[in-house]
Image: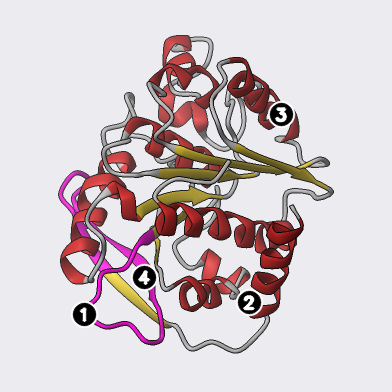
Amino acid sequence: MRKRNFILSLVLLATTLSFAARVDTIRVESKAMHRTIKNIVIVPDDYQSTKSYPSVYLLHGAGGNYKDWVINAPGVKALSDLYKVIIVCPDGGVTSWYYDSPVDSTYKYETFVTKELLGNVDAAYSTIKDKSGRAITGLSMGGHGGLYLSLRHQDLFGAGGSMSGGVDIRPFPNNWDIAKRLGTLKDKPENWEKNTIVNMLDLLKDSSLKLIIDCGVNDFFYDVNSNLHKKLLEIKYPHDYIERPGVHNWPYWSNSVKYQFLFFNEFFTRGSLRR
């Protein structure tokens, strides 16, 4: 524990220093949604096409866009340099919840992220083109997305995370346009039941998908995150769970993302996390 705390202290110190990661904006044509979507890709300052780099897909929350992480948590650029990792910030729409909507064919963000964007990134950048070199996480709606997409695509992502995530959508039937993506809870209860994280744990067939879940104790999503942690304990699935003082805001996520990247770096460099 003392060694881990010392390493984390070095990480937090390093991310306060000046780094020079390159920030690209890429346009990806979505054939699934018949439009072009902007995304940000951050590469380390010493990026070389002759090397292969792990990638972390970093998802924004409801009401946000692809620029959110760079603007509101500029320290993520330092994490790219520190861990020599490519960071991909997709545009997930204002309230897509990263679903392929069963009620609105114009929303196919699961397909966009996992097929169209991922394929374009792997073609344009020198990534590790295997789940051993890919992770996905995000905040709020993006926390739901990080777990939803990693659970459903364990062939693509070796690690998944969530920061203040909406990991159980059922208590919030009138919020954040979820009903526009799934139909109303009253009319389409089956869509809500099968597309909420707490009901998807049966997809965890073994312990290969590495998970980290994080939420502030004063967050309105705290109870659903605590409950998800308990369910994972019940099925004895290994995961990292962090709760600490904090609310649903950028100061919390700017700190939280550092812990997530430390977790992912251990996955990338060791293949599996030391328990």
Question: Which corner quadrant holds the C terminus?
Answer: top right
- Neighbor class of circle 2 (other Cα within 10 Å; few <14, some 14-19, many 20+) is some
Q: Are marks 2 and 4 in contact (CB under 8 Å)?
A: no
Q: N-terminal of the two: label 2 or label 4?
A: 2
- Residue 195 screen position, x and y as percent: 44, 23
Q: Are marks 1 and 4 in contact (CB under 8 Å)?
A: no
CA gap, disc 2 and disc 1: 25 Å
The quarter of the displayed image where residue 15 is located:
bottom right
Q: N-terminal of the two: label 3 or label 1?
A: 1
Q: Are marks 3 and 1 in contact (CB under 8 Å)?
A: no
The quarter of the displayed image where residue 218 is located:
top right
CA gap, disc 4 and disc 3: 32 Å
Q: N-terminal of the two: label 4 or label 3?
A: 4
Q: Which mark is residue 41?
A: 4
Which element type, helix, strand or loop, lies under badge 3?
A: helix
Please tell me which residue lies in front, 65 or 140: 140
Q: Which mark is residue 156?
A: none
Mark 3 or 1: the one toward you: 1
CA gap, disc 3 and disc 1: 42 Å
Mark 1 or 4: the one toward you: 1
- Determine which residue is flagged by label 1: 49
In the image, which residues are magenta? 27-55
Mark 2 or 4: the one toward you: 2
Q: Amino acid at mark 4?
A: Val
Q: Are marks 2 and 1 in contact (CB under 8 Å)?
A: no
Q: Note whether 221 is above or below 132 in the view shown.
A: above
